[in-house]
Amino acid sequence: MDERSRKPLIGLAIVLLIFVIAFQAWQDPHYIHIRAKERSVDGGNNGDLMAQLPGEFAVASLTGFKEVVAGALWIRADDFFHRGQYQAIIPIVRLVTWLDPHNIDVYTTGAWHLDYNFVDEANSMSDKRYIPASIALLKEGIRNNPDIWDLYFELGWTHYQKKMMDDQQALIWIEKACKKHGSDPNTGQPIDRPEFVDRMLAHSYEKVGRFDDAIKQWYVSLKDVKDIIKKEKQNKDIEAGVDETSVDLCNRNLALLYLRLAWRYGNMDYYEKGLKLAEEVSKPLDRNWEIVKAKNPGQKFPEPDWSVATKAARADYESRKGKQWAGDAAKPLDAGFQVTWMRVAPKVLLIKGKLNLIPASEYKDLASEAFTRWYRDNASATAERKQLWRDGSRVYWRLEDYDYKMPTLNTFSWRINTDQTVAWDSIYVGGGAFSSRIDLGDIRDAEMYPFKAKKYKLTIWVSPIQPGVPDYVQDRIGWKGEALTDKNCLDTTTVPGLEKPIPGFHFLKKEFILDRRDII
């Protein structure tokens, strides 16, 4: 957002704010007087008095004029959104949160706009300089609404996990969300938080390698879902949107967690536990399959995929009992990470390289193959359809001023340091190679990428954590990338963009120091 567009918007916000303050100063004594009468009439029952009030005062006494104005402004912000006038939205967000600090949607939507909607023209990459403002806005919302789950979760999942790829920080905030309940937007009464919040906590534990905590959390989620279903059956007025599908979802995730811990690290106890859960999931599938066959004699219906996969995994388990087995992630895999960059035009970089993730041959005889059957199906495919690589991983890149450090804002402000340059994104890996042309030189993006510093840091790295690698790649390299080796690029200490290392994780990283003339 440039100064030319910012100044009139700030002026509009100031005019509206002055109007609201002046009107509120006039209205508040009347509002207090009305509230005092409400408490003194009919022993505190305000129904008779409310019936005598003019409509405008009734609305004001129930909601407060500030909330009414805030709602009108928010409708206006929605109009700006649909027109694509994103620069106009954030000043309104600021004003609305002043007027109505308990409107959760304003905080979540405003932070989302800051995170995602200020994008460049050439690449559709968001302006990362607005991220501190997004964090500050959500934290302000949390301070104003500390007892409900919504904004804690929003900060953890939508912001830290999805935008920043900072799973450690994401976990902190999602844990806090799971200690809070919700609030009915119409009545303000406490309500249970949605059960998906607790499921996301289990996934977050997995991402940071806290597998025991993930297992415990899946059991907590499973119990909670069953309790909700029981309450719904006892009280037909309760509609939590939870049914046996939610039970199945928890069981599948827990089964796969156990199975993947077994496949990747050779834990046979977990293998047995995972199989028992998987077989429980299979029972209703098999019953339905038998019913369909009975109703349609003479027709062939394939056995459910889950059931077939579970039986194959059971056979694999039996074949490994009593044998030494360290798991598939114990076998080293040389990543062969190679990366180069070059300037192909002013402020336009070409990043390309090679990455040994993962040749199809690496999947032969993996324990997970019994369940996924990918290698078997691929080996029998026609030449045109046969895959030589298990594609789907991504390489990340980050270009920033050499001394760039993301600021921490104690209070929300959408002003940014327009002298700074910072950008990051990812590149798809296919056939063991990757390449991307990054255009930071479009004249329309000059403010987003000013390139005023003398030196820059270009970092290209591979993370073993999803979404950097899919689960089927983790089946070979482990949750933390334990199988990854590389004589030149292996890094087990630092992660670009994060201040703290993640113990036990294997990253691949290559860093280049560039002068301004290398880019310009």
Image (cartoon, rainbow, N blue to C red):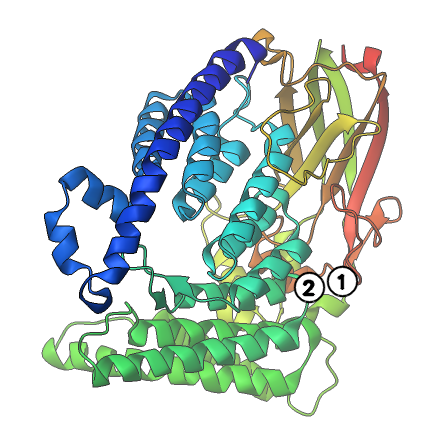
Question: Which of these two is toward me, 461 or 401?
Answer: 401
Question: In the picture, residue 513 is in which quadrant?
Answer: top right
Question: Which of these two is toward me, 17 or 516?
Answer: 17
Q: In this view, does 499 lie above or below 206?
A: above
Query: Which residue is drawn at the image coordinates 11% and 48% (left, top)?
Result: 52
Most extreme residue toward the right, as rendered? 487
Q: Where is residue 466 in the image (x, y as percent from the top left)?
A: 60, 53
* Left-right relation of 448 to 275: right
Question: Which of these two is toward me, 377 or 1?
Answer: 1
Q: Is residue 107 above or below residue 116?
A: below
Question: In the picture, residue 195 is in which quadrant?
Answer: bottom left
Q: What element carries label 1?
A: loop
Which residue is the site of mark 1? 482
Q: What element carries label 2?
A: loop
Residue 258 seen in the current view: no
At label 2, the amino acid type is Gly
**Tag of residue 478:** 2
Q: Position of residue 394 (x, y in %)?
A: 62, 42
The quarter of the image holding the C terminus is top right
Q: How far apart are marks 2 and 1 (CA)?
A: 6 Å
Q: Position of residue 442 (x, y in %)?
A: 59, 10
